[in-house]
Amino acid sequence: MLVGGAIVGLVIDSLRPGAITGGAFGLDGWRDALTDREFARAVWFTTKVSVITTALATIGALTLAVGLRSRPRWLLGAIALPIPVPHLAVATVAVAWLAPGGLVERIIGTLPFMVIGDRHGIGIIVVYLYKEIPFLTLLTLASWDQCTIELEHVAATLGASRLWRLRDVVWPRIGSPLVAGALVVGAFTLGATEVPLLVGPTHPDTIATYALTTVRINGPAGRATAAAALVTVVVLMLVCAALAAFVHRQLRRRR
Amino acid sequence: MKRRRHTGSTAAIALVAALLLSAPLVVLVVQASADSWRAPAIIPQRFGLRGIRAALADPLVPIAIRNSLVVALITLAVALMIAWPAARALAADKRRSLRLALLAPLLIPPLALGEGLTPWLLRLGLADHLFAISLAHLVYVLPYVALALIPGFTTGLVEKEHAAASLGAGALFRIRTITVPGLRRHLALACALGFAVSWSQYGTSVAVGGGVPMLPLVLVPFARADPQIAAVLDLVFLIPPLALTVGAAMLRQHGELPNRTWPLR
């Protein structure tokens, strides 16, 4: 009920400039957002960061899972360490390590590229990779169970190559949670607020920081534009969720 | 011999992984106690308690900690009241899709949810109120609390309750002697998870709370202005998640918690 109410409230807010003060319905908020070059840049930047983060996190998780699949449980505990740490705490730690004059530069000298505040979002990507690679690794390993390992052994005995085993034995079992998890990570990165605020560039914005900035600069008059921007993120997330559900169903059918 | 080599390599990997993943966080302890830490020094020039004193002297910090505590406790109480019957019903239903649907609200960006709820809360006269922030946090806390409670109801607990009822035990007696003792581990996990999720909410708090000081909102400006105070607040911020990690590890070690990945976000 709260989620439904929030989405309806957001859509109404985007269609009724001054919804709080009782203004008339109109498309001004959407027009302002869609004609604003900063919003277009924010959508592109957010999507780019989200896609890169998701791809790198998935590849990293799969690589780690391959290396850790028959390791003891307590080792997984060490890998799981960053999962409960809030994103905000990780972002402040990233500033301490990776900002100009931070610990990394004090130890190894000047970094060849900027991480914190980089206009390509490297800082945001680094923070999310630290959090999401362990998350996706554990999600993958939960499905890469003893039964899958035994199936791998059987396939190996029958002469299957390593690549063939990964494609036809392991992937049908781990693919579903890994893809679903990856899309959840992607959707989550799309809506991030605090991480881009702390380690992201001042320009371009992410969609969420664009919404915050619009309200801060324009006050209540900017609420409709901010709401339109946030509706866009919700739509992008719903697309991600639908995609995750579709892939999940396909892989389950194959399994 | 081969087994010993395998154990050795595993321990080495574990050590490297634990070091790589925990080292970045350890810097918070050093930074919180570094009264002077100017570049290019790798070790602080002077240690002290300036960060703690300055954090406590800031009028917003104690209020923010108190508000975050109150909001997390209210959210947790409401979440438990709703999640308890929901978990009971979901435990009896074996459809995985229903449990996955529980996680769907987590996909909505917190800022979008908060901004969407604000007009309604303003009309109800609740905006900028701690209860309003709790309502917004509830969306993210409820799924975790319910998911933590579900396994407790699938371990024969309901059958034991039915057996006690057929022997004439009253409802209160059943709850006190069967339900709560049978669920206590899951209840502890649900409380820890729910508290940690509410405690670390930023987007919903900034959207719904307006000017109400909350710990994550107070922390952000310090991250740029005074890293030492930010590190002190970060350590306070990390207490519930760390308690959750340690508690879950202990329960798992005693075999009282299944090995599963909690999608804590």
Image (cartoon, coloured by chain):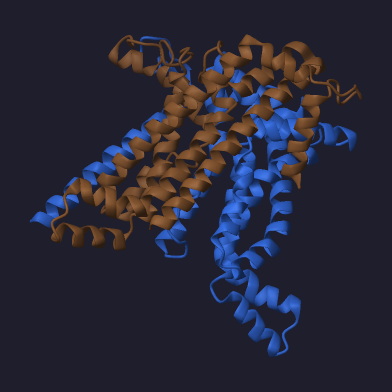
Chain colours: A brown, B blue
Of residues B155 and B59, the one drawn nearer to the viewer in this rendering:
B155
Tell me: residue A195, above or below residue B80: above
Furthest residue in direction bottom, as rendered: B167
Quadrant for residue B23, please give it: top left
The residue positioned 67% from the left and 27% from the top of the image is A230
Percent of width and height locating residue A1: 76, 48
Locate the C terminus of chain B and report the quarter of the image it occupies. top right
Locate the N terminus of chain B and report the quarter of the image it occupies. bottom left
Furthest residue in direction left, as rendered: B1
Tell me: residue B184, above or below residue A251: below
The residue positioned 84% from the left and 36% from the top of the image is B120
Percent of width and height locating residue B208: 75, 32
Percent of width and height locating residue A32: 73, 14
Of residues B33 and A121, the one drawn nearer to the viewer in this rendering:
A121
Of residues A105 and A21, the one drawn nearer to the viewer in this rendering:
A21
The residue positioned 62% from the left and 10% from the top of the image is A37
Left or right: residue B28 compared with residue B20: right
Percent of width and height locating residue B251: 46, 60
Tell me: residue B7, above or below residue A105: below
